[in-house]
C-alpha cells in the first residue's frame, strides 16, 4: 500500500521550493557566490519534468518519490560541500 501523502500533488512543489533554497545556500556557503541562474534553471527543469509526469495519476507517487530523493541529494551535496563544482581538494 502506498502512503497517502505520496498521492498529494503538492509534494513536488514543496520539494522544488526546498531545492531552490538549498541550491542558493550551497553556492553561497560553500563557494561564496550568488546562485548561478543555470543551476537554478537546471534544478527547476528536473522538478518541472516530474510535475509533468505527475499529471498521470498512476505516475504521481513515483514522481513524488523522485522529487523527494532529488531534494535529499541536494541536501547531501550541501552538507558534503560537493555541489555542482565538485570537491575543493
Image (cartoon, rainbow, N blue to C red):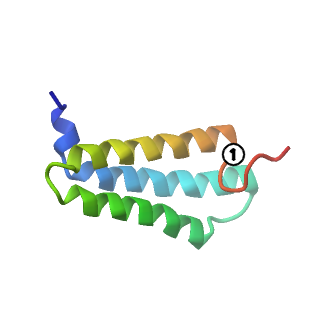
The correct choice, above or below, for 27 with respect to 34 in the image is: above
Closer to the camera in the image, 69 or 37: 69
Task: Please state the total of marks drawn on the protein image.
Answer: 1
User: In the picture provided, is 62 more to the left or to the right than 69?
Assistant: left
> For the point 18% across and 46% down, which residue is it?
8
Quadrant containing the C terminus is top right
User: In the picture provided, is 47 more to the left or to the right than 55?
Assistant: right
> For the point 62% across and 64% down, which residue is it?
35
Q: Judging from the image, what secondary structure is the residue with disc 1 in? A: loop
The correct choice, above or below, for 41 with respect to 55 in the image is: below
**Residue 46: x percent and y percent?**
42, 60
> For the point 38% across and 43% down, which residue is it?
68
Q: Choose top left, top right, bottom left or bottom right for residue 78.
A: top right
> For the point 45% across and 45% down, which residue is it?
71
The correct choice, above or below, for 71 with respect to 20 in the image is: above
Quadrant containing the N terminus is top left
Judged from this view, the residue extending furthest toward the bottom is: 37
Few, some or many residues within 10 Å of mark 1 (<14, 14–19, 20+): some
Closer to the camera in the image, 9 or 57: 57
Judged from this view, the residue extending furthest toward the top is: 1
User: In the picture provided, is 18 more to the left or to the right than 60?
Assistant: right
For disc 1, the marked residue is 82
**Residue 19: x percent and y percent?**
47, 53
**Residue 64: x percent and y percent?**
29, 46
Amino acid at each position: 500500500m502506498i502512503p497517502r501523502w505520496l498521492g498529494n500533488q503538492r509534494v513536488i512543489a514543496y520539494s522544488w521550493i526546498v531545492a531552490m533554497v538549498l541550491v542558493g545556500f550551497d553556492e553561497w556557503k560553500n563557494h561564496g557566490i550568488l546562485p548561478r541562474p543555470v543551476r537554478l534553471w537546471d534544478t527547476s527543469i528536473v522538478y518541472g519534468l516530474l510535475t509533468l509526469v505527475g499529471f498521470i495519476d498512476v505516475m504521481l507517487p513515483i514522481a513524488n518519490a523522485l522529487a523527494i530523493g532529488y531534494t535529499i541529494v541536494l541536501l547531501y551535496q550541501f552538507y558534503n560541500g560537493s555541489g555542482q563544482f565538485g570537491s575543493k581538494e
